[in-house]
Amino acid sequence: MRTFWRTGAEPGGFGFAPAALGVLLILLGLLLYSHPQLLAYFVAGMFVLAGCGLLGVAWRARRRVKYRRTDGAW
């Protein structure tokens, strides 16, 4: 029968994601070290992603803004 409480003796899946991300970042660093011209493409890609993210934030903020008259009668 399987218990719902974790005792710590079972292997958990939480450590896999940070470990995989760490290995990915190390491999990316080694790739950029061996091919420095890829750094320009990497930085350009980050700028494009950041720009798209900011456009998305601006689009959502534009839809949320509601204008009302403030000089009307209460």
Image (tube, rainbow, N blue to C red):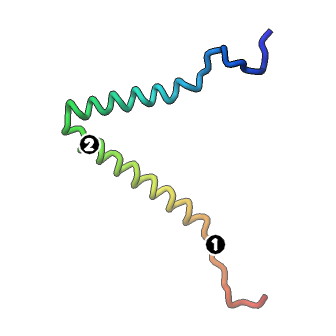
In which quadrant is the N terminus drawn?
top right
Where residue 74 appears, as percent x and y from the top left, is: 78, 88
Marks 2, 1: nearer the viewer? 2
Where residue 27 appears, as percent x and y from the top left, is: 33, 27
**Viewer-nearest residue: 44 or 17:** 17
- Residue drawn at x 72%, y 18% is 7
Name the element at disc 2: helix
Task: Determine the image quadrant of residue 32.
Answer: top left
Where residue 63 appears, as percent x and y from the top left, is: 58, 64
Whole-number angstrom distance, CA of label 2 to CA of label 1: 40 Å
Number of residues whose C-alpha sits closer than 10 Å to that of mark 2, classed few (under 14), some (14–19) or many (20 or more): few
Tell me the number on the disc at residue 66.
1
Q: Label 1 near label 2: C-beta < 8 Å? A: no
Q: Is residue 32 left or right of residue 51?
A: left
Q: Residue furthest top?
A: 1
Residue type beneath disc 1: Lys
Residue type beneath disc 2: Tyr
Tell me the number on the disc at residue 41.
2
